[in-house]
């Protein structure tokens, strides 16, 4: 048979059996992935091999004792010898990496520019009131959930979570004194609660539910792509296969904005305001946010939310104690000004603050944010050689914001204060957060 005949027969087969062809191709890819996982590269130790939970110990309320852990001030003499890893930034990302690496015998140093470790898991006391700066509710922490298992392992099982009331989010629409309140309801009644509040919009709400479930469920395929060997992913992306077979890309969940999806579903502006309320969590207005991101956050909180007893600094406090067990350190007031690289562009160390102290380690991890890392910390030549660099300009930064911390005297029960968040739209405009961020500073503060 001539080559042209073979090609024609093969193309004919593909055209008449497209599903079979795609399944066959996927099986081959799977076989390749399994092969590369099982037979190539060195296998590392598993940081989650042993269950590290221990019975919860009494809470430590004494500020000085907590500060020994959370505010260990940088001094050159405190830097451990023979470091394996330096991590820039002590947010939950840096601390989680630090705990896992400590568990497999790596000596870790985490450097934090602030005077307290924890990043957005940092709480502080002012005039006798304790305030959280970031984390104030987390979803999917029911017993046995993957997040719960991971957080338990990272903190030696020392965190205690309290489930918040089912109506942990309330959407307020309108001027403060006359605002209409729409309480959300966690659990199986989530969408029925919305239908009860917008009975004429039942179809739109059910379509929204299906889209949220589909988009949030399809997120896993992107996670899998991230876990695959990079060369394989590049190959797959070049073939265009992910766009054809993966729901996430095929249905445009990453490219369609929240506003586009809501505009297609309904003309009811009040319902749109309620459905998009959670955008404060991801910091992008509906006209800019990809629907996939929105769906993932909605799904994350749909079954309820949890709060760490004794405040969000408990998370950092217990993770740092785990890092200490491996001989590592978390030092504050140590701003990294530069990542040091050798002539090949491999990161070999960091420069700390004004003292210009250089510290070296085998591995450098930056948890200081992608923009800071590529535009401020890495040498320009090294940063620009990365595939990530052009994407940073494209993605840009999310909005800055101002936080007002308000202390009230009396317990929540005494003051009859409901627990939970109120998400306020001051008018009918979906993107008001975005319009505020485009105002001048004085206007913003007045607003
Ligand atoms: C106001 C707010 C509320 C939030 N509420 C919630 C919530 O309720 N639930 C939820 O799940 N998520 C919430 N989030 C999101 C969540 O808190 C963050 O996504 C998460 O904590 C980020 O962790 P991270 O480790 O990536 O970064 P970060 O916590 O930002 O940590 C980065 C650290 O790096 C340090 N750093 C930066 N540059 C340098 C340098 N050059 N040298 C040394 N150190 C440096 C910073 O000081 C910081 O401590 C909230 C976020 C904010 C801002």
Image (spheres, rainbow, N blue to C red):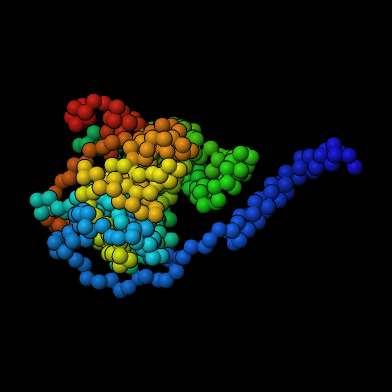
Q: Is residue 346 visible?
A: yes
Q: Nearer the viewer, residue 194 or 281?
A: 281
Q: Residue furthest bottom?
A: 55
User: Picture quarter containing residue 34?
Assistant: bottom right
Q: Residue furthest front?
A: 343
In the rendered image, the quadrant that contains the C terminus is top left
What residue is rendered at 18% in x and 61% in y?
A: 68
Q: Nearer the viewer, residue 97 or 362?
A: 362
Q: Nearer the viewer, residue 69 or 301?
A: 69
The x and y percentages for residue 144 are 42, 65
Q: Residue furthest right?
A: 1
Q: Is residue 21 left or right of residue 444?
A: right
Q: Nearer the viewer, residue 382 or 218?
A: 382
The x and y percentages for residue 11 are 79, 39
In the rendered image, the quadrant that contains the N terminus is top right
The x and y percentages for residue 271 are 39, 37
What residue is rendered at 46% in x and 39% in y?
A: 386
The x and y percentages for residue 118 are 27, 53
């Amino acid at each position: 048979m001539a080559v042209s005949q073979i090609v024609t027969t093969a193309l004919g087969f593909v055209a008449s059996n497209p599903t079979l062809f795609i399944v066959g191709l996927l099986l081959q890819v799977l076989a390749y992935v399994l092969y590369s996982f099982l037979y190539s590269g060195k296998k590392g130790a598993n940081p989650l091999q042993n269950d590290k939970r221990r019975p919860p110990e009494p809470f430590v309320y004494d500020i000085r004792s907590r500060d020994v852990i959370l505010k260990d001030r940088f001094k050159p003499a405190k830097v451990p010898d023979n470091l394996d890893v330096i991590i820039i930034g002590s947010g939950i990302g840096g601390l989680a990496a630090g705990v896992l690496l400590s568990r497999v015998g790596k000596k870790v140093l985490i450097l934090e520019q602030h005077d307290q470790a924890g990043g957005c898991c940092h709480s502080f006391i002012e005039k006798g009131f304790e305030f959280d700066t970031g984390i104030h509710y987390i979803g999917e922490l029911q017993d046995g959930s993957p997040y719960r298992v991971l957080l338990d392992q990272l903190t030696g099982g020392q965190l205690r979570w309290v489930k918040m009331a089912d109506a942990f989010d309330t959407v307020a629409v309108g001027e403060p004194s006359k605002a209409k309140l729409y309480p959300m309801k966690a659990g199986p009644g989530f969408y029925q609660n919305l239908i009860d509040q917008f009975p004429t919009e039942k179809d739109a709400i059910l379509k929204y539910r299906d889209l949220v479930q589909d988009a949030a469920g399809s997120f896993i395929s992107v996670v899998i792509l991230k876990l695959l060997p990079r060369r394989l992913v590049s190959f797959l992306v070049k073939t265009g296969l992910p766009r054809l077979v993966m729901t996430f890309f095929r249905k445009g969940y990453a490219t369609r904005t929240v506003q586009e999806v809501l505009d297609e579903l309904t003309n009811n502006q009040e319902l749109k305001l309620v459905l998009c309320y959670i955008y404060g969590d991801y910091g992008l207005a509906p006209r800019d946010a990809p629907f996939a991101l929105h769906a993932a956050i909605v799904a994350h909180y749909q079954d309820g939310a949890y709060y760490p007893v004794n405040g969000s600094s408990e998370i950092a406090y217990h993770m740092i104690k785990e890092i200490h067990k491996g001989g590592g350190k978390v030092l504050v007031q140590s701003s990294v000004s530069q990542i040091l690289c050798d002539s090949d562009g491999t990161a070999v160390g960091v420069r700390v603050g004004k003292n210009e102290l250089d510290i070296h380690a085998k591995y450098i991890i930056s948890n200081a944010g992608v923009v800071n890392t590529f535009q401020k910390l890495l040498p320009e030549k090294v940063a620009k050689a990365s595939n990530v660099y052009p994407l940073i300009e494209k993605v840009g930064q999310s909005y800055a914001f101002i936080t007002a911390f308000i202390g009230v005297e009396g317990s929540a029960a005494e003051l009859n204060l409901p627990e939970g968040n109120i998400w306020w739209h001051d008018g009918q405009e979906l993107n008001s957060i975005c319009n505020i961020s485009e105002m001048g500073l004085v206007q913003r503060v007045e607003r």
